[in-house]
Amino acid sequence: MKRLILTAALMLSIYGTSTAQQGPGNRQNMSEEQRVEQLTTNLKQNITLSDSQWAELSAIYTDYYKEMKAMREQSTGRPDRSKMNTLTENRDAKIQALVGEENLKKIQEAERTMQGAGMRGGARSRQ
């Protein structure tokens, strides 16, 4: 009986550890559209934009995530960091033109917060 209880406890701890490592939302299995939806849902808590601005912002992020995915798939190892940074800078320039400098800063801060919480918004913090 002790052996059965110990085996069950061991199995539960292994299961708990494996599911905890997946993180919130399990981003690796999410499509670009799902990632954008999750990101914009979080951003809407801090930023007020018009419906057309939200639609355009979603399009910018969808394109960004698709380009990043293509870049990762084309590389044999890690993608070129400078190309990734250029892609991120281009994305940020489009966002700034759409929502302004103040809202861009709010978006970047929200991305850093989400990244720290385990849900990456795409770009790494650049300080």
Image (tube, rainbow, N blue to C red):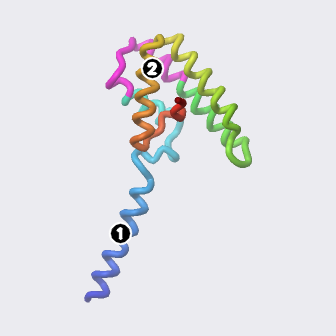
For label 2, count other residues whose C-alpha is less than 10 Å away and answer few (under 14), some (14-19) or many (20+): few
Where on the picture, by quarter, is residue 68? top right
Hey, what amino acid is under mark 2?
Lys
Judge left or right: residue 89 versus residue 38: right
Across and down, in percent, residue 27 comes to 48, 44
Question: Eyeballing the image, is 127 above or below 2?
Answer: above
Residue at 31% of width from left, 75% of height from top? 9
> For mark 1, what is the residue?
13
* Secondary structure of residue under mark 2: helix
> For mark 2, what is the residue?
105
Question: Eyeballing the image, is 53 above or below 8?
Answer: above
Residue at 44% of width from left, 56% of height from top? 21
Task: Name the mark nearer the viewer: 2 or 1.
Answer: 2
Across and down, in percent, residue 105 comes to 45, 20
Q: CA distance from mark 2 to mark 1?
A: 41 Å
Where on the picture, by quarter, is residue 37? top left
* Secondary structure of residue under mark 1: helix
Across and down, in percent, residue 29 comes to 51, 46
Front residue of 29/45: it is 45
Look at the image and give the residue range highlighted in magenta: 43-60
